Amino acid sequence: MIKIAVYGKGGIGKSTTVANAAAALAEKGLRVMQIGCDPKADSTVLLRGKDQPTVLDLVRSGRDFSLDDMVSIGFGGVICVEAGGPTPGSGCAGRGIIAALEKLAEKGAYEEYKPDVVFYDVLGDVVCGGFSMPMRQGYADRVFIITSGENMAIHAAANIAMAIDGFKNRGYASLGGIILNRRDVAREDEKVAELCSDIGSGLVGVLSHSNTVAQAEELGKTVIEAFPQSDMAKQYRDLADSLMKICGVSEDA
């Protein structure tokens, strides 16, 4: 089982990218689990096409709940979990991540579903407290950072990379590389290349700024499901192939 944490600035297209990569890997016959670690609880919505309770909602309910209550099965058999977050204006969002990961382990999720690949989709503007938990020892093996060439996205990516480097002596996950999700801004390739050079990492994949993504989202689906023959679907499949290669996952896992 390979466990991958994906970080990036809010609004950078992280959840859409992760969901499409998960769908592409599931399409290859891999058993994939996607855990949304964002208080908005919308990481897996394109895969599952329906609402599901978050882990934090279940914990707050005070009732006993099962693994089945925490999980829904989405497109291609992707196992979908949403950590959730606190009531707006109260509590710590990072605690939802901690609760979700602890409850998944407690309920035996990994033993029950036996995923080949686990994605943690993490809000990454700040890497502290519960938001750093997916990269801790025993959780993710590799961290990938999604960015565009926009200055704030580059700044967030650099901060995330700095945090990963700061955790390296604790046995945390290592940086797998940068994913460029284009916004077609000035000097985009140049700025992302500079980022890679500054943090000593490589470019894992490049995704076009395409209306196909928005069209699929309007349908409530991944590009892989909605437009499987499109160029964007190919780009997501190519990204999935790159992730597998870097993480050492074989198609017949």
Image (cartoon, rainbow, N blue to C red):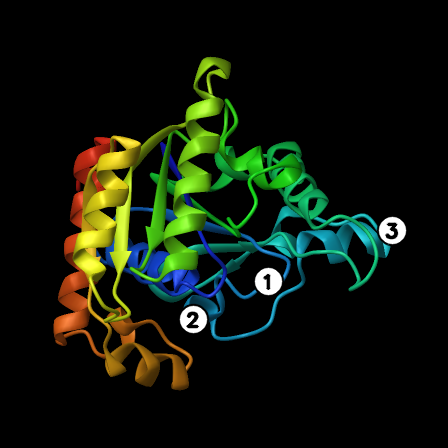
Does 134 sit above or below residue 206? above
- Number of the front mark, 1 or 3: 1
Residue 68's x, y, as percent? 61, 53
Residue at left offset 20%, top offset 69%: 208
Please indicate, yes or no, whether residue 250 appears anywhere in the rendered image. no
Q: Which mark is residue 46?
A: 2
Of residues 178 and 229, which is closer to you in this image?
Answer: 178
Residue at left offset 25%, top offset 81%: 212
Provide the secondary structure element on which disc 2 rests.
Answer: helix
Determine whether, in the image, residue 51 is placed left or right of residue 78.
right
Please indicate, yes or no, whether residue 58 appears anywhere in the rendered image. yes
Q: In the current view of this chain or complex, which residue is farthest to the top?
A: 169
Determine whether, in the image, residue 18 is placed left or right of residue 232.
right
Residue 47's x, y, as percent? 42, 67
Measure how far apart labels 1 and 3 are at the Cα level: 20 Å
Measure how far apart labels 3 and 2 are at the Cα level: 29 Å
Does 130 sit above or below residue 87? above
- Number of the front mark, 3 or 2: 2
At label 3, the amino acid type is Gly
User: Going from the N terminus, do you reach mark 3 or mark 2 first?
Assistant: 2
Measure how far apart labels 1 and 2 are at the Cα level: 12 Å
Of residues 91 and 217, which is closer to you in this image?
Answer: 91
Q: Which mark is residue 62?
A: 3
At label 1, the amino acid type is Ala
Of residues 17 and 237, which is closer to you in this image?
Answer: 17
At label 2, the amino acid type is Leu
> Badge 2: few (under 14), some or many (20 or more) residues near its Cα, within 10 Å?
many
Q: Which mark is residue 41?
A: 1
Residue 164's x, y, as percent? 44, 30
Residue 233's x, y, as percent? 19, 68
